Amino acid sequence: MAIQLLGEVLVKKGFIDRQKLNEVLRESPHSEEMLGKVLLKKGFINEEQLAQGIAEQLGIPFYPHLKNVDISPETLKAVPVKLVQHYRFMPLELNGDALTIAVHNPMDIWMVENIKLQLGFQVRRVLASKADIDESIRKYYGAVAGTVDKILTKDKEEQGVFVSRKEGLEEIERDSEEASVIKLVNQILTEAIQMEATDIHLEVYQDNVHLRYRVDGILKDVKIPENIYYLEPAIVSRIKIMAHLDVVEHRLPQDGRMKVKLQDASEVDLRVSIIPAYYGENIVIRILPTQMLFDFAKIGFSVEDRAKIERIIQKLHGIILITGPTGSGKTTTLYACLSRLNLPGNKIISVEDPVEYALEGMTQIHVNPKVGLTFANALRSILRHDPDILMIGEIRDFETADLAIRASLTGHLVFSTLHTNNAPAGITRLLDMGLEPFLLASSLEVIIAQRLVRLLCQECKGKGCDACSDTGFKGRTAIFEILFIDEDIQQMILNRRSAGEIKKKAKEKGMRTLKESGMLLVEKGLTTEQEVLRVAETEG
């Protein structure tokens, strides 16, 4: 039977219309393989659709959900990880001397012949998308398994060159064939960035190492080979060198930063924290894009709230507080406000621990308690530099809070953060620090409490798919509780009313709680009630 034309198969399956096919054929009258590449490049079809089309064209079985296939340990052991990583195929079943493998390019006959030669098996091919094959390799072998295997087969003399010092920007060379700790670390960083992770956690235990990525606020285990345990000290040393830390220091915590350049020339800022634990040094790497678009709408503010916030931040003096737990997006909201005010006519000075994002036009100071540069000490000095706007990374004690209030009363606009569960609790926290009610009432303009909620994946609407790693969620947005300090609230501050009383009054005046803001997203079908309740305080 004659082989069908790939274009005709794709049209028949409804993946592309005749008009688009003819357009591509006119532009690229070459082989059928080239046709598929052109269609992918133009975005007319995706990888899975192309794989389905080729499978039907060649009469090869197609596996649309490869990750759901259970693969026996015997099959995995029979195929070396180096071979799997090199040819990018996935062994599925070993029955006697017959091995079934999933491939994404069935035209690569030499690959099949080499697998037969090296393993001594008869090979049966099935087709799957490249993305599904890569996902299965990560699931069963670990993303860096091939590199780890190669490193551990090298001589110790060769391993000594892994951690040579590199100045300036570190480039992630994903396609390098060099098997080294450098490549291993680059693979970990690259995968985390591609998964849009915010943090990388590398933890060492008695006889194993755990690698986890925080994606959309949730930590996810990443499968890695068990023998990576032997390379953990070399990995730590490599990261120390990239972050310009002391390689020989293993007893004390260390913090550093580094930048990596991706293959598309974009840059990513990484903040590194290393602590000595019982079985070795643990690492947490915070991933910070160097170019952020600080936009109120993208953060999650409603049109109504945006207008109110825009009006508040235009004031010449006062305190604007953002509250919430760690990882709730407080810093991003702060920077969004500062970006709006970062104009030639304003002098902005920030005191941070650490500086999260570098903003052109702002003077940013990184506190260093080891040398006596605390928030309070820095504030005393910067007030003599004639700023219009101050940003204090966090109010942690009475001294910092008192200086912030006095700065606002002397004609400065002050932004800062506080760790409280809700907006009214920010008032009681400051009073508990020892601040005078009359000073707080006259200086405070607004308190914004916020949380980050996960959004339902738009591909599967919460059911779970490849795009969201089967979580049902992809991406996050902020929900807010905005407490404007009007005359009524000022009077309650002067009378030292409780957070509950202030909250009740604010709700009467139209304040939406965190839970209520989240439920508006639920009504729009953007998230779930369970997700809102997970991050927002439950009302009593």
Image (cartoon, rainbow, N blue to C red):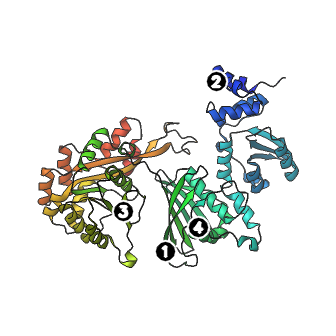
| Cβ–Cβ under 8 Å for marks 2 and 1 | no
Q: Which x, y percent locates residue 413? A: 24, 57
Determine crowd level at label 2: few under 14, some 14-19, many 20+ residues with C-alpha closer than 10 A.
few
Q: Amino acid at mark 1?
A: Pro
Nearest the viewer among 283 and 162 is: 162
Distance from label 3 to label 4 (Cα)? 25 Å
**Residue 51 seen in the current view:** no
Q: Nearer the viewer, mark 4 or mark 1?
A: 4
Residue situated furthest top in the rendering: 18
Distance from label 4 to label 1 (Cα)? 23 Å
Q: Is residue 41 above or below residue 78?
A: above
Q: Please report the residue visible at 42 percent of the width from the left and 60 percent of the height from the top.
A: 356
Q: Secondary structure at mark 1?
A: loop
Nearest the viewer among 174 and 8 is: 174
In the rendered image, which residue does mark 4 sit on? 167
Distance from label 1 to label 3 (Cα)? 28 Å
In the rendered image, which residue does mark 1 sit on? 253
In the rendered image, which residue does mark 3 sit on? 363
Q: Secondary structure at mark 2?
A: helix
Q: Nearer the viewer, mark 1 or mark 3?
A: 3
> Any mark on residue 20, and which?
2
Q: Please report the residue visible at 55 percent of the width from the left and 51 percent of the height from the top.
A: 266
Q: Please report the residue visible at 76 percent of the width from the left and 68 percent of the height from the top.
A: 154
Determine crowd level at label 4: few under 14, some 14-19, many 20+ residues with C-alpha closer than 10 A.
few
Q: Amino acid at mark 2?
A: Lys
Work out whether mark 4 precedes mark 1 in sequence or the reverse, and give the earlier one: 4
Work out whether mark 3 precedes mark 2 in sequence or the reverse, and give the earlier one: 2
Figure quadrant of residue 466 = top right
Q: Which x, y percent locates residue 371? A: 38, 78
Q: Please report the residue visible at 74 percent of the width from the left and 33 percent of the height from the top.
A: 34
